[in-house]
Image (tube, rainbow, N blue to C red):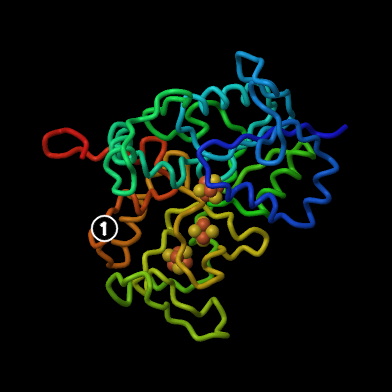
């Protein structure tokens, strides 16, 4: 019997849905085993009935439910609860769903500040007031899915990788559990660490030092070369079977898209420690809270910034 799959998207860019398309040929092996019962990105199945005849949101029963995006409105909250109620196994896909992702950078501002900025303060917007009819109210901040309903499987990444998606779905189809380990991106990086930086922090657009064709395990750690790399505070897993993290493979620093090392980890504290341990001054980094929590601003990691008078700026 086919596995029933439901998928919903909340505060997203669509990149995680593109990841599913990017799976390529392995998708041909998976699709015959699935019966997709709800997936707004590819099918016209409406949550209030096809003609809007229902008064409550309804999603069909499913074996596996996948949610992309974090929670930013009361509608998302209710939909997450409905998905949890109807899906035996619930998967949070992408760092927006797992940790708030890029949209949770807005947690540095109050809802009132966001409305003011978008509907009044923007030079490109003719102000017609704040829309309040036929639109769901915003929640006070962006929430990760597991802050609202329990989640069984987390697939981080911005976007998550096709390989991780296939591995997770294949495990779930076989009735096996799926979870990423506790390693960091540094643990899977082949670059050489000597535990001290060769220079002060540099501008990110300068090239890193390596000789084309040189084996990766002789190239100096990007951070020790003076470039900010979030590998020490970021969960491993983007490298898949190959192991080497994806950005490192391209000789680029890790931006932290797989999120914190553990549920309650604080990437800002972890990164300040990592930078200080090799002699780099973390205070040189502007906008530190947002830089170190770029993909993980839910769960209280990013909050409105108070001004001297006690009010948010
Ligand atoms: S995790 Fe990244 S790719 Fe996925 S929806 Fe969020 S912003 Fe888009
Ligand atoms: S800081 Fe970055 S470049 Fe250095 S070892 Fe860690 S992941 Fe690799
Ligand atoms: S190296 Fe870092 S930023 Fe790049 S894909 Fe992996 S976790 Fe994401």
* Residue at the left extreme, as displayed: 309
Name the quadrant of the N terminus: top right
Q: Is residue 245 left or right of residue 124?
A: right
Task: Give percent across and percent down for residue 266.
Answer: 37, 45
The residue located at (27%, 72%) in the rendering is: 200
Q: Is mark 1 within 8 Å of ligand 3?
A: no
Q: Is residue 96 above or below residue 130?
A: below
The residue located at (41%, 78%) in the rendering is: 207
Q: Is residue 41 visible to the viewer in this orientation of the structure?
A: yes
Disc 1 residue crowd, few under 14, some 14–19, many 20+, Cα 10 Å: few
Task: Give percent across and percent down for residue 18.
Answer: 64, 51
Q: Which residue is mark 1?
A: 286
Task: Give percent across and percent down for residue 67.
Answer: 60, 36
Q: Is residue 156 left or right of residue 50?
A: left
Q: Please state which of residues 304 and 164 is positioned toward the viewer in this rendering.
A: 304
Q: Is residue 244 left or right of residue 36?
A: left
Q: Is residue 180 above or below residue 141?
A: below
Name the quadrant of the C terminus: top left
Label 1: which secondary element: loop
Q: Please state which of residues 276 and 31 is positioned toward the viewer in this rendering.
A: 31
Residue 155 sits in quarter: top right
Q: Is residue 96 above or below residue 209?
A: above
Residue 242 sits in quarter: bottom right
Q: Is residue 1 above or below residue 52?
A: below
Task: Give percent across and percent down for residue 3.
Answer: 80, 34
Q: Is residue 182 visible to the viewer in this orientation of the structure?
A: no
The residue located at (60%, 60%) in the rendering is: 239
How many numbered circles are shown? 1
The residue located at (43%, 81%) in the rendering is: 209
* Residue at the right extreme, as displayed: 1
């Amino acid at each position: 019997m086919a596995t029933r799959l439901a998928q919903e998207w909340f505060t997203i860019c669509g990149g995680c849905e593109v990841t599913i398309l990017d799976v390529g040929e392995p998708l041909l092996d998976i699709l015959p085993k699935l019966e997709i019962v709800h997936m707004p990105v590819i099918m016209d199945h409406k949550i209030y009935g096809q003609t809007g005849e229902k008064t409550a949101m309804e999603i069909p029963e499913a074996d596996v439910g996948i949610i992309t995006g974090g929670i930013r409105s009361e509608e998302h909250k209710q939909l997450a609860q409905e998905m949890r109620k109807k899906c035996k196994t619930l998967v949070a896909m992408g760092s927006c769903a797992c940790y708030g992702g890029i949209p949770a950078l807005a947690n540095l501002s109050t809802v009132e500040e966001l409305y003011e900025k978008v509907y009044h303060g923007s030079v490109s917007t003719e102000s017609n007031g704040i829309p309040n009819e036929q639109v769901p109210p915003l929640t006070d901040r962006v929430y990760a899915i597991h802050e609202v309903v329990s989640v069984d499987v987390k697939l981080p990444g911005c976007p998550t990788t096709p390989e991780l998606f296939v591995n997770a779905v294949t495990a779930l189809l076989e009735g096996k559990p799926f979870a990423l380990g506790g390693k960091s991106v540094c643990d899977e990086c082949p670059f050489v660490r000597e535990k001290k930086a060769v220079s002060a922090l540099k501008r990110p657009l300068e090239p890193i030092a390596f000789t084309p064709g040189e084996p990766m395990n002789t190239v100096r750690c990007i951070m020790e070369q003076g470039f900010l790399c979030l590998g020490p505070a970021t969960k491993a897993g983007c490298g898949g079977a190959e192991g080497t993290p994806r950005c490192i493979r391209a000789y680029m620093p890790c931006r932290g898209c797989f999120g914190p090392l553990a549920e309650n980890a604080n990437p800002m504290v972890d990164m300040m420690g990592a930078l200080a341990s090799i002699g780099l001054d973390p205070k040189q980094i502007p906008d530190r809270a947002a830089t170190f929590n770029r993909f993980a601003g839910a769960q209280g990691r990013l909050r409105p910034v108070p001004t001297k008078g006690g009010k948010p700026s």
